[in-house]
Image (tube, rainbow, N blue to C red):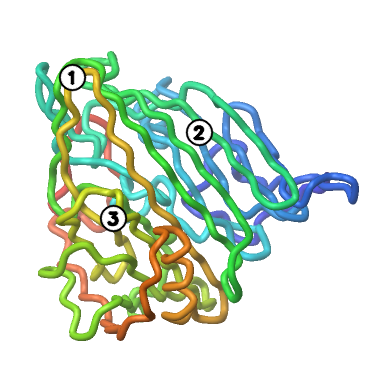
Amino acid sequence: MSITLLPKLRSSFIGASALLIICSAAHAEPVYTFKDTPGDHLDVCRNGIPLVRYQYAYNNSSPEKLQETYKPIFHVMNQKGTAPITKGAGGDFTHHRGWFIGWMKITTPSGTVDRWHMKGGSIIHQKFLSQKADAKSATFTAALNWEGTTTEPILSEERTYIVTEAPAPAYVQVEMRSKLKALTGETKLDGDPEHAGFQFRPANEVDRASTVYVFPKSEADPKKDRDYAWVAEKFVLEGTPYTVAFLNHPENPTDTQFSAYRDYGRFGGFFKTVIPEGGAFEIKGKLLVSEGKELSAEVIQTAANAFSGKAEKTPAITERPADVAPPKKTDPAKKTETPNAPAPAAK
């Protein structure tokens, strides 16, 4: 094992995450391995290099610690494994963290809560249910509880991540499966395209002027279109270009609108649903990530077909520069939020 200090500490690291712990991998071990830093994060490694990181620490000993840890973070690491390319706590809109799900309006018989801005409650990692790694892939499942108007959970979740070999020029391919079970009666998941759904946020240091979105349709309009099979984002982080493609599974709810126009890079699908009392709701998504070289529409569509089981042709595409984010209505010097405070006006 070797320990390397990060050249630049991002806002996404807390506690033990301030050090990059390289995964150990001898020749006799599988290509994919796990490295767990107990109580803080689990790395999935390929040939000893961290590919993705599930940061599951939870600490409510102070408002500051709670704000940093009120939900798990799924990070994608850069190709060298030295730092995340996804956003963690802090920065602009601290509730945007990595690759995540959430809804601004979750309504149960006991009331409505906001598990987007994380007002008045947390999403808490409980334990790992399984971990398996071999020469071809790594899979793990975590149990989480979503708090309601009190600390009692209104939803239990089984969240599974599956990391497999990525088609070139991508270096990461990862699927997320989430199964949410209603614990207190009929549960309505709702919000709007900017404050709910299945979303990805690159690191806060992204070059906002360089953000471009790619849609699988000619003359695409993400504010009107529905049910894209995939959407991609091109962004530049500390001088390095990346492409991230989000693949939408056809079993996810229909009438899904993609929020994919912010210059800071948050994008993903918004959908709403109702989970009946005692019932469950399942969603699936996949990411393809490349560093340096762009992902072509052909590569993305081939991966989308493998994910969906379809045989769609590579579509015409639309590339749209990101919209400029609206001016902040709050003090720009205040970069974090306080748990249980009202949600910010900005997105």
Residue nearest the viewer, comparing 297 with 75: 297
Q: In the rendered image, which residue does mark 1 sit on? A: 277
Residue nearest the viewer, comparing 36 with 313: 313
Q: Cα distance, mark 2 to mark 1?
A: 28 Å
Q: Cα distance, mark 3 to mark 1?
A: 44 Å
Q: Nearer the viewer, mark 2 or mark 1?
A: 1
| Other residues around mark 1 within 10 Å, as few (<14) / some (14–19) / many (≥20) | some
| Other residues around mark 3 within 10 Å, as few (<14) / some (14–19) / many (≥20) | few
Mark 3 element type: loop
Q: In the rendered image, which residue does mark 2 sit on? A: 56
Mark 1 element type: loop
Mark earlier in primary sequence (3, 1):
1
Amino acid type of the residue that numbered disc 3 sits on in the rendered structure: Ala
Q: Position of residue 143 (x, y in %)?
A: 45, 26
Mark 2 element type: loop
| Residue 276 visible somewhere in the drawing | yes
Q: Nearer the viewer, mark 2 or mark 3?
A: 2
User: Given contact means CB atoms under 8 Å apart, are the residues at marks 3 and 1 in contact?
Assistant: no
Answer above or below: position of 91 versus 123. below
Q: Residue at x 44, y 35 (%)?
A: 159
Q: Quadrant of the C terminus?
A: bottom left
Q: Position of residue 35 (x, y in %)?
A: 70, 39
| Residue 342 visible somewhere in the drawing | no
Amino acid type of the residue that numbered disc 2 sits on in the rendered structure: Tyr
Q: In the rendered image, which residue does mark 3 sit on? A: 333
Residue nearest the viewer, comparing 65 with 97: 97
Mark earlier in primary sequence (2, 1):
2
Q: Residue at x 67, y 34 (%)?
A: 36
Mark earlier in primary sequence (2, 3):
2
Amino acid type of the residue that numbered disc 1 sits on in the rendered structure: Glu
